[in-house]
Image (cartoon, helix red, strand yellow):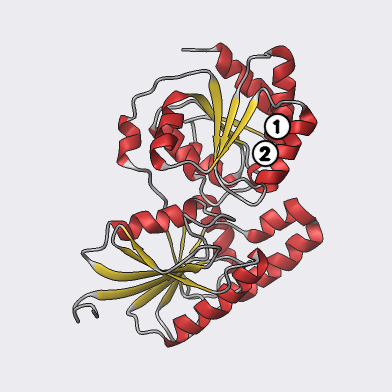
Amino acid sequence: MPPPPSTLRVVHCIYDDPRNPWVGGGGAVRVFEIYRRLTSAVSATVVTGSFPGARDEVVDGVRYMRVGARAPYAWSRLSYARAARRLLRRARYDAAVFDFSTYTPLLLPADRPVGVTVHHAASEGARERWGALAGLALDRLERALLRPARWLTATTPSTLAWLEPRLPSGARTMLVEAGVPDELFALERRPEDYILFFGRLDVVHKGLDTLLSTMASLALERPGVRLRIAGRGRDATRLRAMVRQLGVESNVSILGPVPEMERQALFAGALLVVMPSRFEGFGLVAAEAMAAGIPLVASDIGALRDVVGAGGVLVPPGDAPALASAIGALLDDRD
């Protein structure tokens, strides 16, 4: 049935999705949590990329439409950009939002009410993955894709500071940060014997190579140290191979994706949470760990610096000795 005439019709385009096996990051969770709370006020359709097993569905009152190819990953992203652009040009809506990503190069329609949410600079990650030349190319593409934007939000002050010089005059910007579930503030802590990483299994993005090197050095001095890695992502197989190569199979458990109840149990039992990312758009897991009262070690990068502040220990990204020192200091300080 069509919505009543007085209901605001919203289309929100974001490639990512909480169920997407390749990505499934905090931005997707943020979008779901926003519209789950607005089901009585707006008629919203979240348009995500497709993936193996994906289908159109309603999740807790939020309508999801999957567009583009289901596989492979790169074609899924590019075909999503084409389908989402066509939809933003032709669909009937009162307002639309696009969660910006250079890896889904979507050209905004200049004559439609479309806002943009920016989480982080893809060029920053490209420099880490492929070098300075790739970072420069991505930066130029980002500038071109952002040129038509007129209404934009950023999720952290550091992203907003990066964004504003790249916008045309007259563009309006606003800071709209993320939140965490209320139940985390009331989570009953029962610390056990493990360190926890929770997030996307992306070795470069999340600094998992640094984390595993850290575990290898910690295990020499603390043979009983344990790390649990939970989450989904494209690098799960690579991560297991790295664990074997470093000889830390007895110290590191890769749990894969976990349901919500198990996630809460992992948070309740963690001695501390580690987030050694090289770049982030917000760092939702860091905020969640602080809400639950879990000691936190995170990388000293723009978004995490904004989110964590004095709520955790910050160490230089990619610095395994500094990460090991911070973890060891917290493990020795039970108070």
Q: Secondary structure at mark 2?
A: helix
286 or 20, nearer to the observer: 20
Location of residue 227 in the rendering, given as x and y in whole percent from the top left corner: 60, 27
Q: In the rendered view, does 203 fall on the left or right side of 90? A: right
Q: In the rendered view, does 263 fall on the left or right side of 52? A: left
Q: Mark 2 is on which residue type?
A: Leu
Q: Quadrant of residue 174?
A: bottom left
Answer above or below: position of 313 versus 51: above
Q: Which mark is residue 291?
A: none
Can residue 155 be seen by looking at this rendering? no
Can residue 174 be seen by looking at this rendering? yes
According to the picture, the residue beneath numbered tag 2 turns out to be 208
According to the picture, the residue beneath numbered tag 1 turns out to be 212
Answer above or below: position of 26 versus 167: above
Q: Quadrant of the N terminus?
A: bottom left
Q: Secondary structure at mark 1?
A: helix
Location of residue 78 in the rendering, given as x and y in whole percent from the top left corner: 62, 73
Answer above or below: position of 240 versus 116: above
Q: Quadrant of residue 37?
A: bottom left
Q: Quadrant of residue 269?
A: top left
Location of residue 247 in the rendering, given as x and y in whole percent from the top left corner: 76, 26
- Which residue occupies the extreme front position in the image? 53
Location of residue 326 in the rendering, given as x and y in whole percent from the top left corner: 62, 23
Q: Mark 1 is on which residue type?
A: Leu
Q: Classify 10 Å Cα crowding around label 2: few (below 14), some (14-19), many (20 and above).
A: many
Q: Whole-Å distance between the Cαs marked 1 and 2?
A: 6 Å
Q: Residue at x 41, y 50 (%)?
A: 178
Q: Are marks 1 and 2 in contact (CB under 8 Å)?
A: yes
85 or 312, nearer to the observer: 85
